[in-house]
Image (cartoon, grey):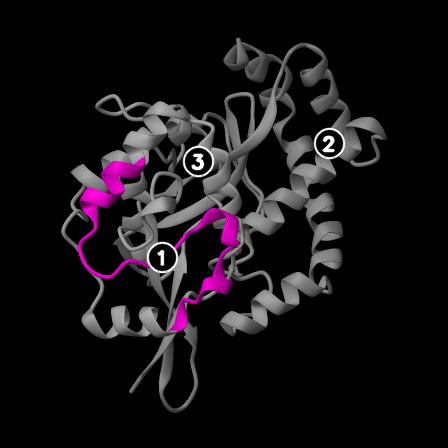
């Protein structure tokens, strides 16, 4: 149905819709360039707008489109409204571009629009329209191993299975060592709990693997090529000294465990098998350390 609606209501007016999206993107850029959280993020990673702001821009553009559907102003929006009124869907899309980059795009029926096409190379056109997602270079992410592999290529992360915080592993199975600070002298590496994979997160909690809920996380932790990858002893020691009881809410009792904890991780999955309501507690605990360095280490 979505393909037929796209062919009838979107593709014949593609140029008109793209022009309207360019106008909306200029408005979004004017707002985001001066927004405090964006400025803080750019400063933290030593980047300039729009580099690295793919998700922020996509989300702002999606909000702008929905706002325009109520009070149309930009060109092409009336075409989108007719599409929606006839059963078409406009929704977020998170995927991989050419097996090299993460892309936060927008699905319009079966068409896909990269509304942040310039967040890796600022010289590119900010809007890229593909008539069908199946023939576009943007592919849906289906596994946490894909996330890990592309994060290592695209963001220069060093990704590990989260066996160090077993209570979080079913919902947050990825840890990553990232560049926390760069300068003329030593660099600083930090350890983060990888989050913000909304589409994959929703599929994870509804997927079952070997009878266990959070099946995509289970598959990554017990079956992927990352199964045997472990943090260095030096990073483990830094975690011991820096992860305090205050890191997480005491109610959640989340703590760091040194060494190989796969058996403990499996036990947490077994508990979830009996009581899936605990997933909400894990989600809440993970959010407490969102965008937080669990520990950091200076590298010469």
Residue nearest the observer in this picture, 46 or 107: 46
Q: Is residue 266 magenta?
A: yes
Where does the image place residue 120, in percent across and percent down from the top left?
A: 47, 58
Residue bearing mark 2? 66
Q: Distance of mark 3 from mark 1, alpha carbons?
A: 20 Å
Query: Few, some or many C-alpha atoms within 10 Å of disc 3 (few <14, some 14-19, many ≥20)?
Result: some
At a point 52% along the width and 61% down the height, the residue shown is: 123
Which mark lies nearer to you, 3 or 2? 3
Compared to residue 131, the image places residue 50 above or below, namely below
Residue at mark 3:
201
Residue at x 45% of width, y 33% of height: 278
Is residue 66 in view from this perspective? yes
Q: Are marks 2 and 1 in contact (CB under 8 Å)?
A: no
At x 19%, y 49%, the residue is: 226
Secondary element under disc 3, as helix, strand or loop, is: helix
Query: Marks 3 and 2: CB-CB under 8 Å?
Result: no
- What residue sits right under mark 1 in the picture? 154
Provide the residue span drawn in magenta.
242-268
- The answer to whether residue 110 is left or right of residue 21 is left
Quarter-of-image position of residue 259: bottom left
Q: Along the polypeptide, which appears first: circle 2 or circle 1?
A: 2
Instruction: Give how far across and how far down residue 20 sits, in percent.
Output: 72, 38
């Amino acid at each position: 149905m979505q393909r037929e609606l796209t062919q009838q209501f979107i593709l014949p007016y593609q140029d008109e819709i793209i022009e309207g999206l360019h106008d909306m993107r200029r408005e979004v850029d004017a707002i985001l360039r001066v927004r405090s959280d964006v400025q803080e993020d750019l400063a933290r990673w030593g980047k300039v707008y729009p580099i690295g702001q793919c998700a922020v821009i996509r989300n702002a553009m999606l909000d702008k489109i929905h706002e325009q559907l109520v009070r149309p102003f930009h060109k092409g929006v009336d075409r989108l409204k007719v599409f929606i009124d006839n059963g078409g869907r406009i929704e977020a899309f998170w995927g991989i571009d050419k097996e090299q980059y993460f892309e936060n795009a927008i699905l319009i029926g079966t068409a896909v629009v990269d509304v942040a096409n310039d967040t890796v190379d600022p010289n590119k056109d900010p809007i890229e329209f593909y008539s069908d997602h199946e023939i576009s270079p943007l592919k849906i992410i289906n596994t946490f191993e894909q996330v890990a592999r592309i994060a290592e290529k695209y963001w220069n992360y060093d990704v590990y299975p989260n066996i160090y915080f077993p209570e979080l592993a079913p919902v947050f199975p990825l840890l990553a060592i990232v560049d926390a600070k760069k300068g003329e002298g030593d660099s600083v590496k930090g350890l983060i709990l990888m989050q913000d994979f909304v589409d994959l997160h929703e599929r994870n909690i509804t997927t079952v693997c070997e009878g266990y809920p959070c099946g995509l996380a289970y598959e990554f932790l017990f079956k992927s090529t990352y199964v045997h990858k472990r943090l260095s002893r030096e990073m483990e020691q830094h975690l011991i000294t820096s992860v305090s009881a205050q890191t997480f809410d005491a109610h959640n009792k989340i703590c760091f465990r040194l060494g190989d904890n796969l058996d403990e991780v499996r036990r947490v999955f077994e508990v979830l098998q009996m009581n899936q309501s605990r997933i909400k507690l894990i989600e809440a605990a993970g959010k407490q350390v969102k965008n937080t360095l669990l520990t950091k280490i200076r590298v010469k």
